[in-house]
Image (cartoon, rainbow, N blue to C red):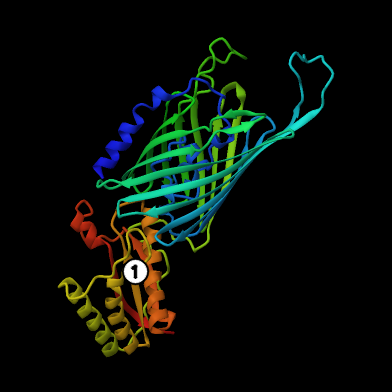
Amino acid sequence: MRNIFIAVLVGCLPLSALAISGKGTTAATFLKISVGPRAVAMGEAYAGLADDATALYWNPAGLAQITTPEATAMHVFWLEDIFFDHVALALPWLNGTIGGSLVYLNAGDLVRSDIGDTPDDPGRGTFSAADFGFTAGYGLRFSEHLHLGANVLMFSETIDAQANLGWAVDAGFLYFLPWPGLRLGGVVQHLGPATSLREEYYRLPINFKLGAAYLPLKEVALTLDYNQLLEQPGKIALGAEYLFAGTLALRAGYMYQEKIDPSELYANFGSQAAAGVTAGLGLRYAPFRLDYAFVPYGFFGTTHRISMTYQFAAASPAPTPTAQPTAVPTPVPTPVPQRQALEERIEAISRRIELGQLVNIQFKSGSTILTPESLGTLDEIAAEAASFPDLRIRIEGHTDAQGSAKTNLRLSQSRVQAVQAYLVDHHRLLAEQFIPVGYGESRPIADNATAEGRRRNRRVEFKVVEEQP
């Protein structure tokens, strides 16, 4: 893995030297318009975080962090009469997540003119311009620490009666470092052939990006990105997010933008007018999330982005030392001999796991797919549960502290639901006999700072709780 990072860093060193000092010389520039108010409000420093459906744009490897189906829609109040819309969908699939997105930009009615025309010349009518893009991507949980992702993008540009079609690909990685809460990401965007318009060819806006994210607390995220567009000097972006009471997110960032030509001073704006800060906020309520971002562009004006995100599965509450993603019914009196007998049998299975006589219940890295070796253990547990059909059993899922707390909570819930599905589908047990509860990383039994501690914290436990109603 060290060799991979050395190769990435060495490969990025000459990018500044290769940058083309000719702004506006590339096609499909609408592909550079950022999506997702959360990422934009954090200064567009998102390649190392990218944990929602907008990861299709920022870093497709980030899709692999999504364990619950998610959809998002965004509208941008852009400069002048231009509007820009974006929708995306992410669905867990196999050992990762598949996603798709659409973007549409409409420049409205533009005044037609010719070389030499002045404002006093008679009008030549109007024309329209619009851009459209579709992206399909997949994020793969390659290993416990490494996620990989790739996109395929198809786009069209229409100006008056002229049309331009093209395609491109993106590829990225996300690496979770051994230090809790720290990760690195990298992506190359818009790799594809030059496109033509009126028999002239234009390069695509190729972008190389490296990013880092640090989550020192469950409520805090700090991000840093370096962007190298092929046609411009490199840029550095910084971002921060604070989640208050699991409901209100406050965000701010800074992204370096190109200086305006010093000779072009309008309304007392200087050469730094287009460089500034970004800000925004988010509201979370059950499966919904509302996000907003404010971005100033000096004398060009300001832009506003707003989006609504929905998670199709019931959302879990924010993890706290006592939070549970699903309500656990209050235990009711249970026949003591039956309850003790089942508890003793499950404890006996647990001891056999500790002694290495049975394989622990495990999943393919970062996924909800049970390993074949784990099925034998589940078969024994199913046999014991079938002997006591009147008792309910809580299936508890736990993870280590690698990755974000939100992702770990969702992953643990999805995994215990996968265990329940196996017991029901393969052993014809009643779903009502089991209560799947994911606790994420909130209940460790060992130190997450060591590999052995993280291994012990990744576990599934069974607890007898009550009689069936």
x then y, percent, for residue 29: 57, 32
x then y, percent, for residue 111: 76, 26
Q: Residue furthest left?
A: 355
Q: Residue furthest top?
A: 263
Task: Report the label total.
Answer: 1
Q: Is residue 137 above or below residue 395?
A: above
Residue at the (27%, 48%) spot, across then down: 180
x then y, percent, for residue 325: 41, 64
- List the residue tagged with mark 1: 370
Residue at the (22%, 83%) spot, across then down: 344
Picture quadrant where residue 266 is located: top right
Front-most of residues 324 and 404? 404
| Residue at disc 1, secondary structure | loop
Residue at the (79%, 29%) spot, across then down: 126
x then y, percent, for residue 387: 32, 89
Task: Please give left or right for residue 86 compared with residue 143 in the image.
Answer: right
Q: Quadrant of the N terminus?
A: top left
Q: Residue furthest right?
A: 122
Q: Tell me, yes or no, if residue 330 can be seen here.
A: no
Binning the other alpha carbons within 10 Å of mark 1 as few (below 14), some (14 to 19) or many (20 upward) gives: some
Q: Tell me, yes or no, if residue 219 can be seen here.
A: yes
Task: Please give left or right for residue 179 compared with residue 306 in the image.
Answer: left
Residue at the (35%, 31%) spot, across then down: 12
Q: Is residue 144 above or below residue 272?
A: below
The three-letter amino acid code for the residue at tag 1 is Leu
Q: Quadrant of the C terminus?
A: bottom left
Q: Is residue 256 above or below residue 8?
A: above
Front-most of residues 411 and 137? 137
